[in-house]
Image (cartoon, helix red, strand yellow):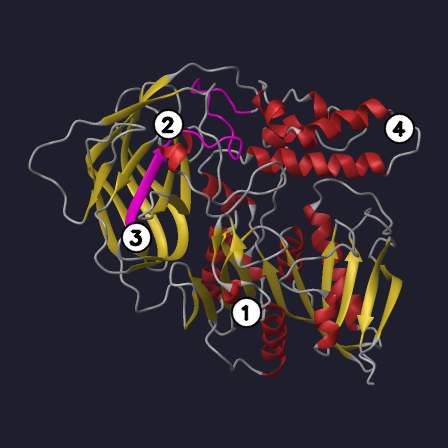
Amino acid sequence: MTELGRIEGGVETPMRDGVLLRGDLWRPASPAPVVVFRTPYGRRQISSDTLQPQHCLAGGFAALVQDTRGRFDSDGEWQAVMWEQEAEDTYDTVEWAAAQPWCDGNVFLAGTSYLGIVAWLGAAERPPHLRGIAPAMTTGAAADLRDTGGALRLDHLVGWLAYMAADWLGRQSPDTDPALAAKVASLIHGPERAMRRLPLADMPELDLPGFPIRIGDLLGGRVRALPDWDPAAVEVPVLSVTGWYDVYAGATIRGHLEMRRLRPDLRHELIVGPWAHTGALSHLQGEVNFGVAASAAAARLPARHLEFFRRCLDGPGGSDPVLYFLMGADEWRTAEQWPPADVAGHVLHLTGPAVPGRTPGRLTAVPDTASPAAPDGYVHDPADPVPSRGGRVLHLGRLTPGPLDLSRTAARPDVLLYLGDALTEDIDVVGRVRLRLGFATDAADADVMARLVDHLPDGRLLPVCEGVVRLSHRDGPDTPVPRGEPVRLEIDLGHTAQRFRAGHRIGLMLSSSNFPHYDRNQGNGEPPATAGPGTPSDHSVHYGTSVLILGEGAER
């Protein structure tokens, strides 16, 4: 039997300031390219289906899985947010690994979410021996602000901070006050109660003496939850991986497009499956079985990573650089670019009347100009928000991502639904989705949540993609909101690849809340972290210029 290699635990990597970071090394018998994973979650806990160290070893690569500074076995001081330090440590790790006898001088960076962000940060430092990166499901501060339209990913922020607080408490002395642990446990097991209290900055479950970050600083923007980097500084090929129900799908795809624009001389690749932001990239998402071929394992996702790394070393040849899953058809497609050059776009006009929670409005290919329609309205009550269900949410709290039936949500009196006619033939929506909307509110501020949905013949409404705009951020922070006057909004719903089958109907859902995925806009114009309770407000949708643009081409 041939031995694949060996695993060495506790390998020490010195940083420029003398701090030692520790990791596990998976290495073949002979010097080989090495894939570096840097994680704050425990180097022996990597379970993402994108790529794992055992895949690297089986494919002839070495893998170094390292605890980041101050985490688990690594020395140094951990801070909840230390992006500049992560960039430096990643650079140092790459260059140290390249000089080791078990490495042939070629290094790659890979990982999902935080690990992928660290890969971007390290690549932007231009380590000389870095040959390529494979970041999965990533975003930056500016990209996430664009995707959230000025709203806060409340459940995301609180959930992540709660798990960091639990880990921090567990690493304290054995005589840590058990009352503190009980506070954090209550937040993990019942987060919505804490997120409903106002103001949000006063969250006693996270008032932990000595914990290095305060929820108010995070929600108020005084601490950067996400970093930014200069994509022009990334001078190596990039394999971007995401899923259609990933919270960072839009940012990941735009990052791929930006690298293609900045460095067309390099081979930048994109893989998008029907997955959410989870470690297990299964063919089962939400309440839909996309077929066994939809899983990361069936799609050979780890092997595709290694094939990409080999192309980085041997030359840019190989298959088409874009691999995407067409939902509804439930099959993988390849393309030379994203969006594919041969896809067709569709424009649908919103037409009323729509009665919230009862009678849908219409989506029509030709605008209805016979008579001007009065605006459709609904009342938004921040004390009774539309509950988050499915779609592009994170599962750190109690939310479930993916395609879940929204028909009960559409029956609420604060939700508008617009439906096209039953399709007589299949229609593919591939690419970017946007909504141009005339909207008015009598409040000092308001949100608009837009969801593209697939209306099935059995009455179910399954989410496809979504977007949000906070009116006070529609043209940048602190944009004035004229009370009672319609404003024109541009809502980016991100990218998708969805086949709407014959007999189905294309749908659009509009509301002003999606809680606790996003914070509740209280409508009083106060900052989210310190806002007090708001009051119900009247919102209205105006026709004439309100159109849904499906399957648009590459962004400019």
Rendering quarter of residue 61:
bottom right
Mark 2 crowdedness (10 Å alpha carbons): few <14, some 14-19, many ≥20 = some
User: What residue do we see at 23% from left, 54% from top?
Assistant: 423
17 or 23: nearer the eye? 23
- Could you tell me the amino acid type at mark 1? Ala
Q: Position of residue 489 (x, y in %)?
A: 31, 37
Question: Is residue 197 shown above or below 31?
Answer: above
User: Which mark lies nearer to you, 1 or 3?
Assistant: 1
Helix, strand or loop at mark 4? loop
Mark-to-mark CA distance, 2 and 4: 46 Å
Helix, strand or loop at mark 3? strand
Residue highlighted by disc 2: 412
> Sequence order check: which comes first, mark 3 or mark 4?
4
Q: Quadrant of the N terminus?
A: bottom right
Disc 2 + disc 4, Cβ < 8 Å:
no
407 or 44: nearer the eye? 407
Mark 3 crowdedness (10 Å alpha carbons): few <14, some 14-19, many ≥20 = many
Q: In screen coordinates, is 376 left or right of 85? A: left
Disc 2 + disc 3, Cβ < 8 Å:
no
User: Which mark lies nearer to you, 2 or 4?
Assistant: 2
Residue highlighted by disc 3: 550
